[in-house]
Image: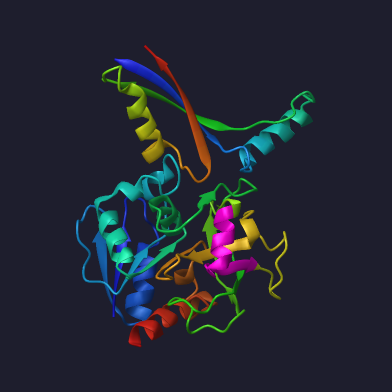
Amino acid sequence: MKYNIIIFPGSNCDYDAHYVTKHLMGEETEYVWHKDTSLKDPDCVIIPGGFSYGDYLRAGAIAKFSPIMKEVVAFANNGGLVIGICNGFQVLTETGLLPGALMLNKSLLFICKHQYVKVINVKTPFTVKIKQNAILDIPIAHNEGNYFIDDDGLKSLQDNDQIVFQYCDKDGFFNDESNPNGSLMNIAGIVNKNRNVLGMMPHPERSSDPIIGVTDGRQIFLSIKKFLKK
Amino acid sequence: MIRATIYVTLKPEVLDPQGKVIKTTLDTLGYHNVKDVRASKMFEVTLDADSENIEQEIDEICDKVLANPNIEIYSYRIHK
């Protein structure tokens, strides 16, 4: 399989993602510059974390107008796998590939720490290898991770099983203490209705190499591999 | 040249963490009359445009770029 990693000015998790997909997972991986007008034949596109365009206006708001995003949208609408991590999630909501919005953290602080999330939907290409309700330790690092969607949107997310990850404590409980940023219903990651586009605030690429101490994020890359092998 | 002042604000039903912290701070300073604060963004936009279609153009700019319709609303004043 082949990954494409999109680089915007201000992306800063592109090399981390590349290290994981190419060197840890052993998959073919190509960078794609935001001004490019075509993808490089990917099976899965990663929109990495960082501060695309300095987070000017709103996080992800300017990146959606980059030439490559037209191709990413077309690829996604054609069923291609797209995963947006952190700033990538923000770009996907701004683009309209995912519903809702990511607002300033409730605490107004940039939060960078280990975080437990519960996997509540394993019927997606990104979680097929994970057990239902598994609790993963995947670090977060963001200023705008406070997920918001209106009542109708939330109902639609629930009716279509689009919520994939929810922030929890180490025992899997949802409460205010285990909600780092004020996200509605502790939402940490969602998919689109077709389940081929995932957005998540936690960084799986920062918890894949054993040298870091936790490897729970690797489950997501292993799931993608398993899904594409079918 | 036409100048427009555009205000982009969070929808009333959306929690505004910045406004809330500012309100708490004002309260701490003794401004107990302040009951609510909502932070917003203001843009000064200068356009070389035909004054007949100006509103349509500003609406388009707001819908496409300046505001995120999921969470924000906008209003503007045109200075002719």
- Seen in the picture, residue A210 relative to A64 is either above or below; the reply is below
**Location of residue A89 (image quadrant):** bottom left
Residue found at the far top of this picture:
B80
- Please state the horizontal and vertical placement of residue B9, each as a whole percent of the image: 54, 34
Q: Nearer the viewer, residue A90 or A216?
A: A90
| In this rendering, position of residue A9 left or right of residue A188 | left
**Location of residue B67 (image quadrant):** top left
Q: Give the extent of the magenta segment.
A: A152-167
Total labels: the figure holds: 0
- Seen in the picture, residue A41 relative to A129 is either above or below; the reply is above
Q: How is the image coloured?
A: rainbow
Residue found at the far bottom of this picture:
A230
Identity of the residue drawn at 34% across and 82% down: A228
Residue A180 visible in the current orientation: no
Identity of the residue drawn at 55% across and 75% down: A121
- Please state the horizontal and vertical placement of residue A3, each as a whole percent of the image: 30, 73
Identity of the residue drawn at 31% across and 59% down: A73
- Seen in the picture, residue B79 relative to A109 is either above or below; the reply is above
- Please state the horizontal and vertical placement of residue A87, each as a whole percent of the image: 44, 55
- Seen in the picture, residue A26 relative to A54 is either above or below; the reply is below
Query: Is residue A161 magenta-colored?
Result: yes
Residue A76 visible in the current orientation: yes
Report the quarter where the N terminus of chain B lies.
top left
Q: Nearer the viewer, residue A120 or A111?
A: A120
- Please state the horizontal and vertical placement of residue A159, each as a whole percent of the image: 56, 67
Identity of the residue drawn at 33% across and 65% down: A76
Query: Is residue B7 magenta-colored?
Result: no
Report the quarter where the C terminus of chain B lies.
top left
